[in-house]
Structures are given as C-alpha cells and as structure tokens.
Amino acid sequence: MATMTDVARHAGVSVATVSHVLNDTRPVLPHTRQAVLDAIEELGYTPNTLARSLVTSRTRTIGLAVSAISNPYFTDILQGVEAAALEHGYSLLIADPHDDPEHERKVVQLLHERRVEGLIVAPSAQPRELLTYLRRHRVPAVFLDRLVDDRADDDAPRFDQVCAESTGPTARLVTHLAGLGHRRIALVAGLPGLSTTAERITGYRHGLAAAGLPYDERILVHGDSRSEGAERATAALLNLGSRPTALVTANNAMTIGALRALRAHGLSVPGDIALCCFDDFAWADLFSPRLTAVAQPGRDIGALAVRVLLDRLAEPDRPARTERLPCAFVHRTSCGCPDEPERPARSEDPEPPRPPRKDAPS
C-alpha cells in the first residue's frame, strides 16, 4: 500500500507539500499540485482520513437527521444532500429521529459526538431540546423542510433554514378545485406544530378566500402527517352529514391514507370526490386516476442545505438566512380534469378561480 512518503518521492516534492495538497492547508503552485495528484492516481494512494482528522481537527463529515424511513419525501432530500456533500468532498453520517422530540435530541448529540463538522436537521414539531443542545454546544446547523422560530436577543434568527414554498402552492390546489365548481373543499392537514402544517393551512384558507368560499372548520382535519392518521381523519370527513366534494391532502403519506379511506367507503376518485395532494411522488402518475399534485424540489432542497451549511462553516459569524424554493403544480386527472399530457408549472401563487360548471357539485 502506497504511503504519503511514496507519493512525495514519486512527485518530487516534500511530504509537507503532499499534506498541503490533501488538506488544502496552504496554497500550492498549480503544476506542483497536479504532480501530486498524478502521483496519487498512479500509486493508488488512499489518505488515512482518521489520522488526517486528528491532525487537522476536521473530519469532512456532515451529520444528517431526517425521518427518511417514516417519510418517503425525505428520501429525495437525502439523495440531494448526499450528492452535494460528495461533490464538495464530504461524507455523511445519517440518523433517523422518527419525528420524536426526545429521540431527535439523542441522535443529534450522537452525531455531534462523532465529530461531524455540521448538521442538517429536519426538526420535529417540538424542537425545544434540539435547539437548546445546538445553542449550548454552538453546533453549526441548517434546518430543512420545516422552519423554526428561534431568535437571538437582537431578534435575528440563529439558524440557517432551507425549505420549499407551502402557502401559495396549497392555495393553488384549492383554487383549482374551486374553479372546477367545488364548494366544499376539505383539507387533511399535517401534524400540529410543524411549520409546514401551519403554512399549508394558511394556504388552504387563502385559496378559499380567493375563490369566495367560506371557511368551515369542520372540514379541516389533521392526519398528523401519517397514512394511518389521514385514513382516520378522512373517514371522519366522509361521515359528516354534508361531506366534502373535494379533498386536499397535505403530504404524500396522508394521500395514501385518504385513498384507503375513500376505497373503504366505496367512493371513486374523481367520480365521487375530487382529490389533489401536496407532495408528488414516483408512483403518483401510476394511480388510476393519476394524481394532481404539488411537487416539491426535494433533491434541490437537500443540495442547497449542504451549500448553506458549507457557507456557515466558512463564515461562522455571518447572519443566518432562510432560503425558499418554488414548487411545481403537476396537473393530472384526480381533480376531475380530462387526461392530458403532464405540464408542470411553477406554483407560488393561487390560480385564479374559473367560473363553475353548470353541472358542478355544490
């Protein structure tokens, strides 16, 4: 196995120069750097990353805490984080907090103790212990998908955050259904306490107002961001005396639960009830009918979170920032529209409601 000394001898430089090239600790002339890189390639030299971290106090590792197992949406984010980390020469340590506040704090502590240089976290609905730990230990961290309102004494936010737009895209789903003539449009919302839940409820109400429809608290139910919860919540909606004619689900797991409840009640989509969902997913186009959805840029969110974290590591004292990415409205057929080629569109603002059809449900 080749050593650093072998690389130095092959390249005609000192061992210190090889170290500077590997660790980027001092400028090296371009032709010298290339000679070292060529020697590494020819000899098949593999750096000892553990030894290097002990010398430099840098592990080139990022900790990622997301509930990827329980929420398929985070799989896309994970892929974006991994690709961007590798592109910048970082590896990942991944932990699943299971959206449980106590477990969340434990896995973040575990990642920190493994000497990750920074953390990317999708916070739970009750992140108090998480925030306390990160502040106490001054851990560089970026929150993704879900925002937290944590501010310093000067009212400046403490943490960088990256997420998708939620309010405008949800409003568009509602106005689209209203434009098809629906007057009782229900929402299966997520877990209370999450910023995504609050923003999608706000978007739902904005969409109703834009369409001139009244808000009825009886047809806003919580599926707690899970399939089982959405199945129960949708069943409750269907048992109302005046049940909704259209349904918006606030994430992909809850869409599955809502579809189960509709099937259990013998109802068809969109014949008996129209359906639009927040979160597109790989098999949404394979359902019959095909699911009209808001698509979030999961991989882009993950990649941007890495870049924001690296900016934080490079400039620890710079002001925290929040980055929001636009979503796309993916028009299919579960809303009741005719089948047509898919044309994704940006979805920041509500779609103006169209005049109702004469035969539309009321």
Image (tube, rainbow, N blue to C red):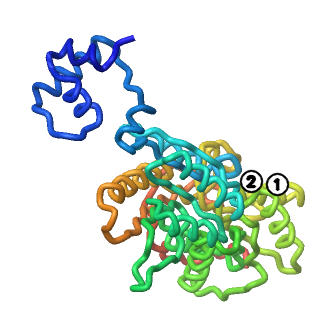
Q: Quadrant of residue 333?
A: bottom right
Which residue sits at x=62%, y=47%? 95
Q: Quadrant of residue 319?
A: bottom left
Residue 316 as seen in the image, left or right of residue 333: left
Seen in the picture, residue 26 relative to 197 is either above or below; the reply is: above
In-front residue for pair 163/116:
116
Image label count? 2
Q: In the rendered image, which residue does mark 1 sit on?
A: 260
* Vertical placement of residue 332 versus 85, above or below: below
Q: Give the image location of residue 17, x and y in percent.
A: 19, 28
Classify mark 2: helix, strand or loop.
Answer: helix
Classify the position of the C terminus by image quarter.
Answer: bottom right
Mark 1 nearby-residue class (10 Å; few <14, some 14–19, many ≥20) = some
* Residue 281 percent coordinates (x, y): 60, 48
Which residue shows up at 64% across the image and 53% down it? 107
Name the kind of residue labelled 1 in the image: Arg
Q: Quadrant of residue 131?
A: bottom right
Residue denoted by label 2: 256
Which residue type does callout 2 highlight?
A: Ile
Asked if one can make out residue 180 in the rendered structure from this viewpoint, the answer is no
Question: SS at mark 1?
Answer: helix
| Of the pair 178 and 140, the residue shown nearer to us | 140
226, above or below 237, in the image: above
- Residue at 85%, 65% (x, y): give it: 232
Residue ID at (53%, 61%): 145
Check residue 133 in the rendering and tell me which mark sits there, or answer none: none
Query: Could you tell me if residue 35 is visible in this image?
Result: yes
Q: Residues within 10 Å of mark 2 (few under 14, many from 20)?
A: some
Distance from the alpha carbon under mark 1 to that under mark 2: 6 Å
1 and 2 marks in contact (CB < 8 Å):
yes
Q: As rendered, which of 300 and 234 lies closer to the eye?
A: 300
